[in-house]
Amino acid sequence: MRGTENMAEGHGSSQHGPGSGSNSTCGFGVWGHRAMSMEGDLEVNHDLHIQKSYLKCSPEADAAVINIREAQDEHDIIVIVSICLPSDTSMCTGLGLGQSPSSVRGLKEHTQITLRMARQKPAPTAASLLCSNTDSTKLACLGTCGKHISRMPQETGKTFPHSKQVGNYLVGKMINKGSFAKVMEGLHIPTGEKVAIKVIDKRKAKQDYYVLKNMKREPRIHQMIKHPNVVRLYETLETDNSYYMVMELCLGGDLLDRICDKKRLVEPEVRRYTRQILSAVEHLHCQGIVHRDLKIENFLLDENNNIKIIDFGLSNTARFEGLSQELLHTQCGSPAYAAPELLAHKKYGPKVDVWSIGVSMFAMLTGTLPFTVEPFNIKQLHQKMLIGEISPIPSDISPGAVHFMQSLLEPDPAKRPGVKEAIKDKWLNEGFTRKILNTAAYENRFCPCGLNPVVLNYMTHIMEFSLSEVINSLINNRPSPAMSSYCLLLKKLLRYQKNHKRAQEQANLESKSRKNEEKRRKKD
């Protein structure tokens, strides 16, 4: 499976290694909140608890946050959010406050929302808890959780082997290498968290027009998506000779190695992975994105054995729904995973990704690819796909799995199910109490209501980010120093809380065991 070549030369290497919104209440936590005023003809009758920093509109509406600026006075931090409303304001369902939507009257083309947050600071705790290398006067306002972030052990330049520093990152060992790019292990200096850094050699990229033209498309694609089964892009950097993409480091290895180690995967495992892949791809398609290079090599695993889709270097966007549908035509991807219509140089839509998922599912279940030709020949490969000349399927695979897999490998795209139809399959949902969450469950950007107040407080007090800078980056899903710092600090905090909870549970069990032992001794 690893030997499949990419049809678009210079496709970047992958990491292998260890607008609109929905209604949800927003609070910014540690500062508390007093009131919200609306500049413009918006009538609001509730206290602060802004549903989002932008209006909820229908998909056709084009309301978006266009600016966030911060002002301060003696008592408050004030964040002013400017919103560009659609020309047809009838498509707006309103800015909801609390649990009920507010009335929206006489909306103007540009509206500002002023978010006022009182500077309420928790009382400092014992100085003995403070980190020795952090200013105690700053830490005093963080509360216990904030101090935990500073006190957690982390790697530094002294302990992390590295060859150079780029921005806030130390560049360490190489994880993987491709024609024009390599993936390195990196360390984010401010947080001490490890990352993956994709390094594109701009000098080599200039040798291939397609690679050079689309070098920055991948970050733009990432900015449109946010899903638990898609690897996260934190930040991009650029020098004269290189372009850097700082991404989430997946510590569970890659799916290809998992298959090679086990020869083939058992059905429950394949079902779980396939559900996660379909969930992520549905999210992509709803954003108008076709991956075009889904394959086993582009599925990584995190520390919790969850799928992470990587490598959007060949992805593209188009409109697939409504009256003005657009189709793609570029021949790209890996031939063994490419749909027949793509190999035939026909125009195609998002169902090419469904075919690739079918090939990947076949590879997981059998340890082989469904269509192979020796020696390699694209025309013969295409012919095998059209007539359904598929590799042998082990007899112990259930009829439900075979039927579902064959439906994904339907050569006629008109008969092949789309992702929304595929996720309803009976076999796919066996043993799961809930259905695959649809894309509405995954916002394609951070919602202010979901931001962690401890991390925000730490970033503004210790790392000296402005609150508006952090919020602006997160709600626009923009790769930036603020984005990377927030995501990595949150990851660090959640890991600490998980380990702390586990340690407490273990301590409770040991305490209970000791008490039981003492009772037995007394009886004896």
Image: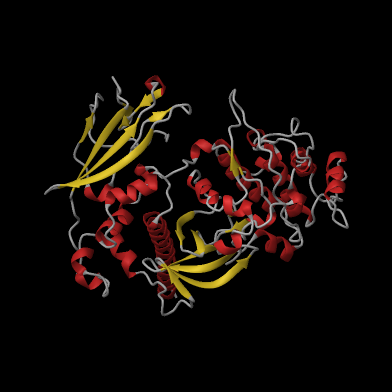
Q: In the rendered image, which quarter contains the N terminus?
A: bottom right
Along the viewing direction, whichever of 261 and 359 lies nearer the viewer: 359
**Residue 120, percent from left and from top:** 18, 50
In this image, 457 relative to 362: left or right? left
- Who's the residue at 79% across and 45% down the image? 398
Please tell me which residue is depicted at 55% across the width and 61% down the height of the picture.
202
The quarter of the displayed image where residue 52 is located: top left
Residue 444, how many percent across, how many down?
47, 42
Outermost residue, bottom direction?
158
Is 467 placed left or right of 431 in the picture?
A: left
The quadrant of the picture occupied by the C terminus is bottom left
252 lies left or right of 510: right
- Count of numbered badges drawn on the protein: 0
Q: Residue furthest left?
A: 74
Image x and y of residue 145, in percent: 30, 60
Whether residue 434 is visible to the viewer of this picture, yes or no, is no
Instruction: Using the rendered view, name the quadrant where residue 424 is placed.
Output: top right
Q: Position of residue 262 (x, y in %)?
A: 73, 63
Residue depicted at x 21% and y 64%: 138
Q: Nearer the viewer, residue 6 or 14?
A: 6
Would you place residue 97 above or below residue 480 in this image?
above
| Depicted 377 relative to depicted 436: above or below | below
For the rendered model, the colour scheme is secondary structure
Q: Is residue 40 above or below residue 441?
A: above
Residue 408 visible, this orientation: yes
Comparing 173 with 318, the one in front is 318
In the displayed structure image, the side of residue 471 where residue 321 appears, left or right: right
